[in-house]
Amino acid sequence: MDRGILEREPELARLVSAAREAADGAGSVVLVSGEAGIGKSSLVRALPDRLPEGTRILVGECDDLATRRPLGPFRDLIGSVGGELAGAVTEGGDRHRVHEALLEELRGAVLVVEDVHWADEASLDALRFLVRRTERLPTLLVLTYRDDELSREHPLRQLLGQVSRTPRVHRMPLARLSLDAVRTLSAGRVDPAQVYAVTNGNPFFVAEIVAAGGTGKVPPTVVDAVLARLRGLPGATVDALEQLAVVPSAVERPLVDALLTDGASVPAVPERGGGPPAAGESLSVTARRGPLTDGVAVLAAAEQRGLLAVTPERVAFRHELIRRAVADSLPAARRIGLNRAVLAALVARPGSDAARIVHHAAQAGDQDAVARYGPDAAKDASATGAHREAAAQLRLVLRERHRYTPAELSDLLERYAVESYTIADSAAAVAAQREAVTLRRALGDTLALGADLRWLSRIHWWAGNADQAQEAAREAVAVLEHAGDDRLLALAVSNTAQLRMLSERYAEAVEHGERAIALARKADDPAILAHALNNVGTARWRSGDPGGREQLEESLDVALAAGEVEHACRSYANIIWTLLDNLRYDEADAFLPPAMELADRAEHLGFLNYLHVELAMRRLAAADWGDAERHAEYGMHDFVPARCPALTVLARVRIRCGRPGADALLAEAWEIAVGTKELQRTGPVAVARAESAWLRGDAQAVVAAAAPVHAQASRLPGAPYRSELGYWLTKAGHPVPPDDSDHPYALQARGQWRRAAALWRAAGCPYEHAGALAESPDPTDKLEALAVFDSLGAEPAARVLRAELRRLGVRHIPRGPLAATRENPAGLTDRQLQVIRLLAEGLTNAEIAARLVVSVRTIDNHVRAVLDKLEAPGRRQAAQRAAELGLLPDDSPS
């Protein structure tokens, strides 16, 4: 076996099997994870030798740039793929073209994307696109990443969550080498026990220590081992290695030649202005081109020592850890000078990536270059859909705001606000847009001020601040009222209508919306027309006017005909939400698939996530708890309109299943809802809080949760949530005004449980149907309700009903689900239960392995699975979570 892949044979076999299955049409995704140096790259490099001759394997890498290159790993494929994909990636502005070209190119291929934890947002978007389609393609997608570098907020988390929901996924967490493997690699050159003690079995670290320890002496650290391999190299070679080490990616051959060859003076980075430096412009900094005369030939000695991989196209360090060890060993002054050399070489080359220029400019401290190229880098990133990278570039640029005129600065701030809005950074978006508005006022640019105020209103609403959204909307209309631009005025007026609709001021929404409709028709703008029709139709429908539905569906038709995907998605979302509120689930089921297919096809992730939350609400009504949670997770981001209902759905599932954690979810949801001042947010949270209080027998808490929101809902015509809140208040003994509607909860509040049960059954709501049956005075009906609760796993409702049946003197009450089912709400296997209980005792993985008579590697995998199922970042938190769920013996420590 190849010494470089010791103890990786099972993983390699699984990779080969997955590749063969993909070639037969069953595509899948492979996640290869582990710490730096664990052998992820070695594993995938060993794959080609095991596959049939002719198998296409494409490899792209993500770079550790301060701000990532848009579509970085796919740019690496240029030269190995067809012209359509190469052109789409190079031009970068048409995300859909990139995605479609990828689909076509990858048929029958294996695509490896290395170091996905460093991927830019555009690349993550492309990977999400591929993941959703891999199952239907003859394609194997292999992603490698460092799982120990992922915070809860890391952008990769969303992609990994999506992968976990695909039917065909292979997880390959790589374990460290055993002492036996270290002994094999050491081959008598060094003491294997010492090597194992220093490296803890990390394959890269072991290889470096062994390579540097030929005399039998083990270096104290891996960095020492790497640097020891530089000793004895020619000075020119060491200089070259240090020069290349400041470039956090593979270095293409033209750049290698430019950096490692003596030449004429290097052109300067020009002052801000368009285009590359003109002939005759001088450098604001001088940069040493390097002491070398033979270019790439000087690297031969380093290549022979295994430090570099050299091909005719590029040069790369054998491992990122080698590059970092060399770069981190440099004095700061030397590192700055080397970055200046790279900056000068990139500026001198036509077509250089602006993101790379800005990275090296920042590392070199050349603020002129940051100011000159940063806006272009942000523009490139935004055009490809890499909005996180665009925001990061603009954040860097805005540190140099004194270099720009007020008009230029206004534009940059507005761009930064929009990018921050897009990536759900509400604080940054609000601050930047406010500053842009202040500058527009000073400049006296009426149209730009009105447009910026409208954007500020939208950003405030999205951030959950209703009052400031309304104020900015009012001023936007006032500024644009007589500015002579019907289109901008129509957009501002329609924005006002939307805010009035969302805050249940339906008559005002209709008034503003009808004016916006007239202005949009005059301006012949179908996008604004669809927006305005949506606001008016939703306001009318939700206020009890069934004619509003026709207008809302007209909004959808206008948007679809004009190809306005965002407006079409919003129309779908409002239609579906209103149908769900009105318990018209079958009709909602007809709209959800085309809505989600449109958002998915267009890669409109914001609305796609929102629609997933609406589907979660639908599955909650059907008492499909697992599916409801799975779809609600799509909304667990900083986008307030999706996060609030997502939190509410997740909380209601926990409430109804008797699982802990609902209170914390509802507390956050309530905080968001109160800030929005919208009944569509406060209503569902209040209902969930009231239900939770009732199930734990706290009537006073039911009233506290439901009464204020019920009073608000009672003042509105056709308001949803009024009936359910009134029902809970009635059960808690709190008087409420009569509700003569035919809503099932209104019927239950009036004692008409049989009619309510029939309506719930017809609507397909088994939990609510059982709840209505439970209110029957007949024990037979109550026992039927109990059976439904038990079958759904609704333990709290079943417990309350059992107590009631005992008070009625009913004998032979069914015991309910087996205790084993209740004792393992996290879904752990028997072995995983054993592991978490031993882990909670403080045992190490090795000690657990000895206790259970299995390998340490097996226990490593079990521990990873336990942490994942318990949603715990570490062992201590896993033990605490297990204790909360009752998975530990009563005498276990926690």
Image (cartoon, rainbow, N blue to C red):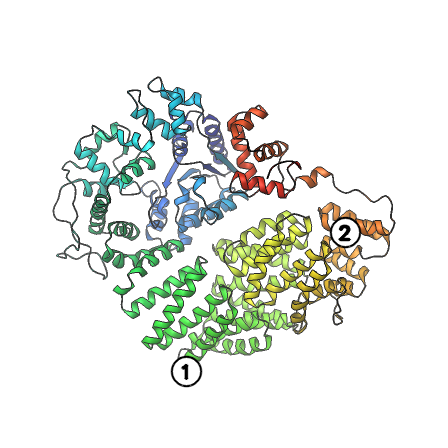
Instruction: Name the spot of residue 425 as percent of width and height, x first.
Output: 44, 58
Judged from the image, the secondary structure of the residue bearing numbered disc 1 is loop
Observer-nearest residue: 193 or 578? 193
Q: Which mark is residue 800?
A: 2
Q: Residue at x 60, y 59 (%)?
A: 591
Residue 838 figure quarter? top right
Residue 697 figure quarter? bottom right
Residue with the mark numbered 1: 482
Q: Residues within 10 Å of mark 1 (few under 14, many from 20)?
A: few
Q: Amino acid at mark 1?
A: His
Judged from the image, the secondary structure of the residue bearing numbered disc 2 is helix
Instruction: Name the spot of residue 504 as percent of width and height, x first.
Output: 59, 72
* Sooner in the amino-acid sequence: mark 1 or mark 2: 1
Q: Residue at x 43, y 77 (%)?
A: 486
One can see residue 357 in this view = yes
Mark 1 and 2 residues: CB-CB less than 8 Å, in contact?
A: no
Q: Is 19 drawn above or below residue 91 in the view shown? A: above
Frontmost of labels 1 and 2 is 2
Position of the N terminus, as image quadrant, is: top left
Q: Residues within 10 Å of mark 2 (few under 14, many from 20)?
A: some
Residue 667 figure quarter? bottom right
Q: Is 564 drawn above or below residue 470 in the view shown? A: above
Q: Is 884 drawn above or below residue 228 in the view shown? A: below
Q: Amino acid at mark 2?
A: Val
Instruction: Name the spot of residue 423 as percent of width and height, x first.
Output: 44, 57
Q: Is 874 drawn above or below residue 202 in the view shown? A: below
